[in-house]
Amino acid sequence: MIHLPREETKAMVAVHGWSGILLGLLLYAVVLTGTAAVFAEEIGAWSAGHLATQSAFERPMAETLRRLGDETPAQYREAVDLFETGDHDLGLFFHRHEMDGGELISRGLFYVIGQDGRVTHRQQGTNEDVYGARNDNALSAFLVDTHVRLHVPNPWGLLLTGILGLSMLVAAISGLLIHRHLFKDIFTLRRSGSAVLANRDAHSVAGTWSLPFAFILAFTGSFFSFFGTVGMPVVAMAAFGGNVQALTEAVYGNPGKPDPRPAAIGNMDRINADAIARAGAIPTFVTIENFGRADAKVTTYHPPKAAAIAPMSLLYDGATAAFLQEKPLIGPKPSAGGTLAAIMSPLHFGNFAGLLSKAIWFGLGFAMCYVTYTGIRLWLVRREGGVRSFAWLERTNMVVGLGLPFALAASAAAFLLAMPLGSATWWTPAGFLVGAALAVGAGAIAPDAARLSAWLRNATAVLLLALPPVRLLTGGPSWGRAFAAGQPIIVTLDIAFLLAGGWMLWSLRDRAHAHRPSIALQPAE
Amino acid sequence: MMTLLTLTAILISATLILLLGLGDPKRRRAARQGEGQGSPLRRLLAVGAFLPGLTFILFSDAAAILLWLGGTAVAGWVVTLVLASKSNAKGMRREGANASKKHN
């Protein structure tokens, strides 16, 4: 592998260690919630008990769209977003774009159309109100928000996660440079030697196997964090006199001669049917520009086609419903930059090939959590018995490393209990905070690291085992109903939680037997 | 069909990685299991493990390449963990037997 001179290797080891130790715990939180968020859509369906399988884009909507367009004030007809919300209901957001404190926002009227075609919800607000957490998606929204910005207000939260992504990139590159026997050691996991050796092997083996994806996930994650907070404002300042709206229109819009003559919107049902046939998949999102005008344009966004990883978007004439072209993500014509920008999302979220790609990305995310956690442990055991004591950091690492899964399981339990009462948006984060407080409390009173580890693992296992029964007892659909409705994901996640909880309890029992003869304090878990 | 093909490719690579892991000289020395495979055999197994991915590259199937790479990486890590727990369990049994012999 790469052989650096001794001094440079020492410097790299220092860079690797300190980049991990300074931001490692926050990075662990971001990676762990990101790993769970890979299945955000499935967790949303499981937690809310969604049973509908027919997409809103497969049901007639043209008449409803025209009627609501007529009812909506002209000031909010600049654009319309169409997307699925709740249990395959249709969300229609008529809005205009405006700047608010230097930030581009959308403001308008939001309608939810139920499966029977009737308006079930009407609300005036901004994009933050429309796309924020609701009672039925509070759990998945909480997971995503924790991953994206750690609940720190914008833009600071995004900047923080962007910096964490960069620190992960630094750790991955420096790790590659300092590892002298990358392939020779790839199967070597010594567990019976010294604590340093065992932790070093655990850290480097998981790190080596997941190395290419550490680069990919760190880079794409930083890209998403810095794109809106740094990239867009800087480019807008350099080329558009600071006008972010003009930049957005130039990059994502559809150039053409403006034609403000009034014209009824074309048949949306025809557009949906054509788009589904061309893309071979239901749209994930649809936008209409210049609604009610002769120059209206409809863009439908779809998951990637087979063998591709870039999502697909199709452009239609809004007034005539005629297909115009396959549209690149950026600009009016295909470009290398446009393709690169388009593959960022599937590379980061692993959502390009259904459940298989999500399962693999989940596994990779788990490996990266393990790398981060064992990396901090390695740094600590190397300093054991030194002049300075890092016992507090060892305990903190355990509280975060094992307490975070416990707090996430607690937030899921809180969601299941609160959703039927309509207060899940409040109780989901509250449940997380209660779980986190319990983990911190356990960290404060536990007599030793082994006991703290056992407490947190036991508590997490019990909560995971309790989630499926709690879901059923609070009115969630039974396995029979889920299967009959064609929603096996509900059953799959129930089984996954039961298996995870059972495995944790079993491994603890195994560990207790293995450690019984020893009365000495075990190395930090 | 595509999913099945990708899964088969991952399975083939994972099986060859398992064989590589079983005969890995350093792992076997650390677990006191004797000598490992020779270099020619290991090279052959490594090339075999990469073949499914190379096939996807030849067919320019970007999604399958990524799935294969990610799936194989996860499978490789799991194989290493399983092999370690097996040799660890054997080691513990061996230690236990030695301890009881001493005791007797």
Image (cartoon, coloured by chain):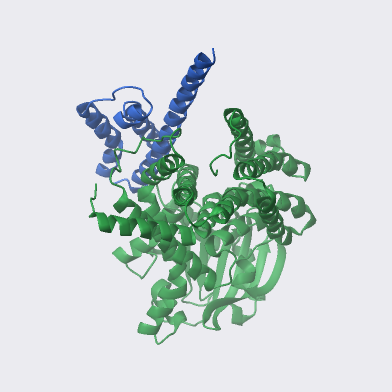
Chain colours: A green, B blue
Q: Position of residue A394 (x, y in %)?
A: 55, 52
In the picture, which quadrant includes the N terminus of chain B? top left
On screen, residue B95 versus residue A122, left or right, reads: left
Position above or below: A506 against A385:
above
Position above or below: A220 against A376:
below
Q: Position of residue A334 (x, y in %)?
A: 31, 64
Position above or below: B49 against A77:
above
Nearest to the observer: residue B99 or residue B51: B99
Residue A343 seen in the current view: no
Name the residue located 44 percent from the left edge and 69 percent from the top edge: A226
Name the residue located 45 percent from the left edge and 80 percent from the top edge: A244
Q: Residue furthest bottom?
A: A241
In the picture, which quadrant includes the C terminus of chain B? top right
How many numbered marks have been drawn onto this rendered protein structure? 0
Q: Residue furthest right?
A: A421
Q: Residue furthest front?
A: A387
Q: Position of residue A224 (x, y in %)?
A: 45, 65
Residue A517 seen in the current view: yes
On screen, residue B46 versus residue A365, left or right, reads: left
Nearest to the observer: residue A194 or residue A142: A194
Nearest to the observer: residue B72 or residue A87: B72
Q: Quadrant of residue B39?
A: top left
Position above or below: B15 against A17:
above
Name the residue located 66 percent from the left edge and 52 percent from the top edge: A439
Q: Position of residue B91 (x, y in %)?
A: 45, 24
On screen, residue A106 versus residue A4, left or right, reads: right
Name the residue located 35 percent from the left edge and 26 percent from the top edge: B22
On screen, residue A333 versus residue A86, left or right, reads: left
Q: Residue furthest left?
A: B40
